[in-house]
């Protein structure tokens, strides 16, 4: 299905005006970046890049889209003719999916004519703002969980398509599984899930429900023990399944206290290998508070799919360089109070000292010409890769394979952070952003 109308009207009315005054074909450089990190967090996580590349393939104005624009008099006949043949033929460079970002990081650099690049603004921002917010929250939860597994189970707290995207972003940032089957099918994410309270309530007794679940799923399943009385639930679970029961799940109560009591009871019943999963309205702070508790894994819903208090990453998409009427390149920038931007094409590097990141180095060119490369910065890691080259997308960043590579890359780059960058408290970014002229 076409993604061309997943955009704001003013993107097309700008093209309409630019076609009339002759500036639509003017070569330009746009940049997608965040001025600050929401919630005074210490880093952000780039997510959504692979989804954006796939959506870009479908960014076409077909008969239905053109008919709608014509019937509602959105743009002129000249613009309709331009849109009918629209294909992005420019170049996009940016941070790899799973990479960390900081204020001012040039997460995407989009080069093309004004008309073909400006129309991508809404699509790029809607995908990266949502997915990066989820991934950043998920990374914080993964840090808090340490070696304990995390499962994403927030589909019912998000829009049906947003839920699939959220599961993908959480998996990239450290979660190990999702409850969402479409996310499993589309993105290759392991899926998990057994039974809800309604299954227990369906049966005459809790024991009947447990026996039914074990008959269907085997003794290695996880039984939900808090529908009625947790102490009785544990006793019933072990009576039915025996001490080889795979796990129990707790979805209510004062979790540190309840988890400790359940662990003691399981051990007394001989179920020393039975795992405890907790799932009650967790976020990164609740997970951190359970670090000393006998919990084996976590299931997180609302907080992760809504960005844990920061539902958008706050990224913006701005024009930073353009050709003038004489064909020369000019750096341009917005100067509004608290909403300014920095003009010029940029290259980004992560400076390192003995393997630990020390700064986000942004090298700025006044115009369009190629800025410095990794060769000029031997003590730094170049952050940008080519995602689209003159209209041709790099398919290695897409699909199931792209997700797996993004997950692997995120795990690698998170190890570069200084230890203070892993803290959950509000503070300045873990790395300073340093600007340098080309």
Image: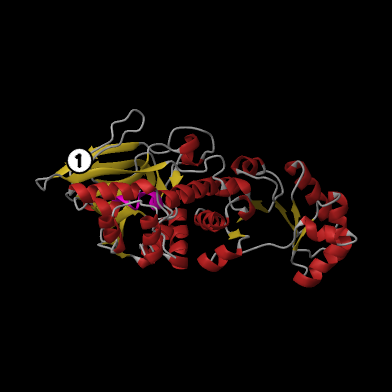
Please name the residue that numbered disc 1 is placed on: 331
* Residue neighbourhood size for the residue with mark 1, other residues' Cα within 10 Å, grouped as few (<14), some (14–19), many (≥20): many
Closer to the camera, 141 or 398?
398
The relative height of residue 209 versus residue 264 in the rendered view (above or below) is: below
Classify residue 134 as left or right of residue 100.
Answer: right
**385 within the magenta span:** no
Element under disc 1: strand
Residue 270 seen from this side: no
**Residue 109, position as x, y percentages in the image:** 29, 50
Q: Residue furthest top?
A: 337
Quadrant where the N terminus sits is: bottom left
**Residue 390, position as x, y percentages in the image:** 25, 62
**Residue 422, position as x, y percentages in the image:** 50, 42
Q: Which region shows up in magenta?
A: 118-124
The relative height of residue 184 versus residue 174 in the rendered view (above or below) is: below
Quadrant where the C terminus sits is: top left
């Amino acid at each position: 299905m076409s993604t061309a109308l997943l955009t704001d009207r003013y993107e097309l009315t700008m093209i309409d005006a630019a076609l009339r005054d002759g500036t639509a074909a003017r070569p330009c450089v746009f940049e997608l970046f965040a001025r600050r990190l929401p919630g005074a967090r210490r880093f952000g996580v780039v997510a959504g890049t692979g989804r954006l590349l796939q959506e870009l393939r479908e960014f076409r104005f077909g008969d239905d889209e053109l008919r709608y624009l014509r019937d509602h008099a959105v743009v002129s006949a000249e613009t309709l003719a331009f849109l009918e043949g629209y294909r992005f033929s420019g170049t996009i460079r940016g941070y790899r999916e799973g990479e960390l970002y900081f204020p001012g990081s040039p997460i995407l650099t989009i080069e093309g004519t004004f008309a073909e690049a400006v129309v991508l603004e809404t699509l790029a921002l809607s995908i990266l703002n949502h997915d990066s917010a989820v991934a950043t929250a998920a990374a914080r939860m993964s840090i808090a969980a340490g070696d304990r597994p995390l499962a994403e189970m927030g589909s019912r707290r998000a829009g049906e398509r947003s839920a699939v995207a959220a599961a993908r972003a959480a998996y990239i940032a450290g979660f190990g599984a999702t409850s969402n089957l479409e996310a499993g099918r589309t993105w290759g994410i392991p899926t998990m899930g057994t039974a809800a309270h309604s299954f227990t309530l369906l049966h005459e007794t809790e024991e009947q429900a447990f026996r039914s679940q074990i008959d269907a799923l085997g003794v290695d399943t996880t039984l939900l023990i808090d529908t009625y009385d947790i102490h009785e639930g544990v006793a019933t679970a072990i009576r039915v399944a025996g001490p080889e029961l795979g796990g129990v799940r707790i979805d209510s109560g004062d979790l540190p206290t309840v988890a400790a009591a359940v662990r003691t009871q399981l051990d007394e019943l001989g179920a020393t290998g039975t795992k405890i999963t907790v799932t009650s309205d967790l976020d990164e702070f609740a997970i951190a508070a359970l670090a000393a508790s006998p919990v084996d894994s976590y299931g997180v819903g609302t907080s992760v799919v809504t960005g844990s208090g920061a539902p958008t990453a706050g990224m913006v998409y701005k024009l930073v360089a353009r050709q003038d009427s004489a064909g020369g390149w000019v750096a341009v920038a917005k100067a509004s109070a608290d909403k300014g931007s920095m003009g010029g094409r940029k290259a980004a590097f992560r400076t390192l000292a003995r393997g630990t990141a020390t700064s986000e180095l942004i090298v700025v060119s006044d115009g369009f010409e190629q800025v410095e490369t990794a060769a000029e910065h031997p003590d730094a890691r170049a952050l940008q890769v080519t995602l689209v080259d003159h209209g041709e997308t790099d398919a290695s960043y897409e699909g199931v394979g792209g997700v797996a590579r993004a997950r692997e890359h995120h795990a690698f780059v998170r190890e570069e952070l200084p230890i203070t960058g892993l803290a959950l408290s509000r503070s300045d970014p873990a790395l300073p952003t340093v600007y340098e002229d080309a």
